[in-house]
Image: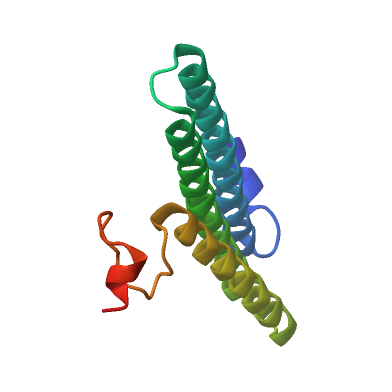
């Protein structure tokens, strides 16, 4: 009842509802990034304490899990920005700002993909046993 009153009070109930939706999505993105960092760090530290694998493998796995958490968090933040811009503020200035934010997040996403997969998104996957010399043949 209280949530309904908060969402639908005033002149534009749809505006407030969409604003709340975008805020909730942003909050979920922050939570996802936070818990991703926390769980990745905990797994990394437990791996160091237990010495289950070599240090380089643990470190690489840690960086990959952090990158995956960040990628999904960025996608959620982009979704919230799109909802907010398209539904709430469809001005030329807000669309331009959204375009710049999306471009920055795309570049961040590409760098995270390179970190995780070891190649640019448009390059074919290399097999682990392929060497640099073999690719020039």
Q: Nearer the viewer, residue 12 or 115?
A: 115
Residue 35's spot in the image, x, y percent? Answer: 54, 33
Q: Is residue 23 above or below residue 113?
A: above
Is residue 3 something one can see in this rendering? yes
Q: Nearer the viewer, residue 103 or 84?
A: 103
Q: Is residue 44 left or right of residue 2?
A: left
Residue drawn at (58%, 75%) of the image: 86
Q: Is residue 21 above or below residue 131?
A: above
Q: Is residue 38 left or right of residue 64?
A: right
Q: What quarter of the picture does the N terminus occupy?
A: top right
What is the tally of numbered marks visible in this picture? Answer: 0
Residue 53's spot in the image, x, y percent? Answer: 39, 24
Residue 52's spot in the image, x, y percent? Answer: 39, 19
Q: What quarter of the picture does the C terminus occupy?
A: bottom left
Q: Is residue 134 above or below residue 72?
A: below
Q: Is residue 8 above or below residue 42?
A: below
Q: Residue reaching furthest top?
A: 50
Q: How is the image coloured?
A: rainbow
Question: Which of the 4 image quarters holds residue 3?
Answer: top right
Residue drawn at (62%, 44%) of the image: 5
Question: Which of the 4 image quarters holds residue 132?
Answer: bottom left
Residue drawn at (48%, 35%) of the image: 56
Is residue 85 something one can see in this rendering? no
Q: Residue reaching furthest right?
A: 93
């Amino acid at each position: 009842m209280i949530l309904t009153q908060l969402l639908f009070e005033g002149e534009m109930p749809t505006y407030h509802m969409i604003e709340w939706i975008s805020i909730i999505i942003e909050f979920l993105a922050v939570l996802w990034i936070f818990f991703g960092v926390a769980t990745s760090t905990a797994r990394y530290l437990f791996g160091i304490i237990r010495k289950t694998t070599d240090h380089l493998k643990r470190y690489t796995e840690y960086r990959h899990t952090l990158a995956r958490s960040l990628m999904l968090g960025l996608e959620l933040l982009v979704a919230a920005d799109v909802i907010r811009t398209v539904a709430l503020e469809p001005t030329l200035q807000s669309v331009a700002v959204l375009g710049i934010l999306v471009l920055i997040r795309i570049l961040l996403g590409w760098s995270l993909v390179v970190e995780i997969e070891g190649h640019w998104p448009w390059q074919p996957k290399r097999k682990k046993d392929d060497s640099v010399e073999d690719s020039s043949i």
